[in-house]
Each structure stands twice: as C-alpha cells, then as structure tokens.
C-alpha cells in the first residue's frame, strides 16, 4: 500500500504561481511513475505532468512551458511548480503513483487539492 498526501493548493490570481507537493508514505520512486492529474467541474480527469523512475518527464500541451514536475527522493516528495496560472487551470489536482505488475497496472491516488485561479 502507498499513501499519497497532497498540499499547496489555494486561490491565486491569473499570472500567479503555486507549488503543489505530494508526499509518499514510503520509497517508491524507483519503481513507480509519479504524476499529477487534474479534474475540473464537468470534465474528465486529465494528466498534467508525470515523471518516471529514470526522470523522464511528460507534460500536457496546455501546461508546457508553465508547469514543472520534479521530485526529492530523500523526502519521498513530488512537486508541481505552476507558473503563469490561468483561469482554465482551475481544478482539483491529484497526485498519482502507478507501476506495472506484469500486465496489471496498480494505481494509487491522493485525496486531491483545490487550485482556483481567479481575480
């Protein structure tokens, strides 16, 4: 089992910045892909950014150049630095960890943290 706890959400004006944190309950970065997803009201959950055990990162087109995913292995923590925030970034942001056991994918999710971008 893996517990993921997010923090760092809040209300910010357009153009502002926030940093989300996700602390994992144990060392998992060597075998799990870590990611941030978001879900806006009435929309499907979507991948925002991810980072593999080999530090390969991936971003949604809508956040490229504005968001950065990183991790601190010693702290079991993944971060999402969000700059240049736009109202359309408003959503609940979820931390995710997944790995494959053969052909079966195992996912863990955090409880989510609200990000609201509004003037």
Image: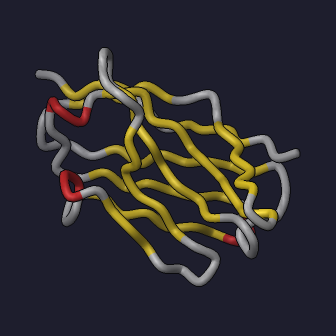
Residue lying at the far front of the rendered structure: 103
Q: Quadrant of the N terminus?
A: top right
Residue in view at x 71 percent, y 69 percent? 29
Residue 96 place in picture, x, y as percent: 60, 47
Residue in view at x 22 percent, y 63 percent? 64
- Position of 69 compared to 14: left or right? right
Residue lying at the far right of the rendered structure: 1
Viewer-closest of 100 and 58: 100
Residue in view at x 65 percent, y 53 percent? 97
Residue in view at x 69 percent, y 47 percent? 107
Residue 87 place in picture, x, y as percent: 15, 30
- Position of 98 compared to 89: left or right? right
Viewer-closest of 25 and 30: 30
Residue 44 place in picture, x, y as percent: 36, 29
- 39 vs 99: above or below: above
- 60 vs 96: above or below: below
Quadrant assignment, res 71: bottom right
């Amino acid at each position: 089992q893996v517990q993921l706890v997010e923090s760092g959400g809040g209300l910010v004006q357009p153009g502002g910045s926030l940093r989300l944190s996700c602390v994992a309950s144990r060392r998992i970065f060597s075998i799990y892909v870590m990611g941030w997803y978001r879900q806006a009201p009435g929309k499907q959950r979507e991948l925002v950014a991810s980072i593999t055990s080999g530090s390969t990162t991936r971003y949604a087109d809508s956040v490229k150049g504005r968001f950065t995913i990183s991790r601190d292995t010693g702290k079991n923590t993944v971060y999402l630095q969000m700059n240049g925030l736009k109202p359309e970034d408003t959503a609940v942001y979820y931390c995710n960890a997944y790995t494959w056991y053969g052909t079966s994918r195992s996912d863990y999710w955090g409880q989510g943290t609200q990000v609201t971008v509004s003037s």
